[in-house]
Image: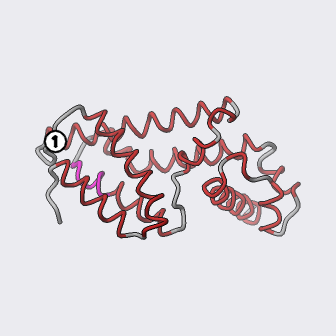
Amino acid sequence: MGRLTDTRDQIMDKAAELLMQRGFNGFSYRDISTHLGVKNAAIHYHFPSKTDLAMALINEYQQTLRNQTSAFMAYGGKATPQMEGLFMFTESQFCMGRCICPFGALSVDYDDLPPEVRGATERFMSDSVKWLTRVLEVGRDQKEFNFQGNPSEQAVMILATLQGARQMARIHGKETLDQVFHQIRTQLGMRTH
């Protein structure tokens, strides 16, 4: 069982990498199988179609978001660690060579995505905005943040900014991310550390 799980994980890792480099339509199972040294049949065993593979990737991202935010969404707590966690996640993804957000990569081929993948992408983005909106509301209510405007609109702006910052950092280096994090903290009136 461990070997099958390892192969599945390796397939998903390579698919995530290719998705971020080329978009959904920019890679095939052959690209994955060649890299892993397996037959296409091994990939089809785990993911009968590319839609199944994309759905597995989106579900993994969704589960990561839920795991990292569930306690906050259920019980509240401090907002600052949630925001700092978003910055740390963005930086760690960049340092792993994931310079493009997976949903930014999916947006490249958005109009051509299978309906299930498009729907799952929309739900994930909606959940991300909902979570960050809640972080901003709680942070402002608890006086951790001091910003003007609608929290939902701020959430969209922050997520879009971080997505763009990852791409700019690919060209200009990690200090771009640091500058963007600093500016978001400043805009939100967060205490700097």
Left or right: residue 38 compared with residue 116: right
The image shows residue 170 at horizontal and vertical percentages of 49, 65
Q: Residue at x 42, y 40 (%)?
A: 128
Query: Which part of the image, by quadrant, shows the N terminus?
Result: bottom right
Q: Is residue 144 magenta?
A: no
Q: Which residues are magenta?
A: 78-84
The image shows residue 65 at horizontal and vertical percentages of 45, 47
Q: Residue furthest left?
A: 143
Nearer-the-camera pick, 38 or 191: 191
Left or right: residue 161 compared with residue 108: left
Q: Height in image: 37 above or below 13? A: below
Q: Is residue 82 magenta?
A: yes
Disc 1 marks a residue whose amino acid type is: Phe
Q: Residue at x 18, y 54 (%)?
A: 186
Q: Residue furthest front?
A: 171
What residue is shown with label 1?
147
Q: Secondary structure at mark 1?
A: loop
Left or right: residue 53 compared with residue 190: right
Which SS type dominates the magenta stretch?
A: helix
Query: Which part of the image, by quadrant, shows the C terminus?
Result: bottom left
Nearer-the-camera pick, 59 or 129: 129
Rendered image quadrant of residue 87: bottom left
The image shows residue 18 at horizontal and vertical percentages of 67, 58
Nearer-the-camera pick, 82 or 122: 122
Rendered image quadrant of residue 142: top left
Rendered image quadrant of residue 36: bottom right
Q: Height in image: 124 above or below 98? A: above
Q: Residues within 10 Å of mark 1 (few under 14, many from 20)?
A: some
Q: Residue at x 41, y 56 (%)?
A: 165
Q: Residue at x 51, y 46 (%)?
A: 63
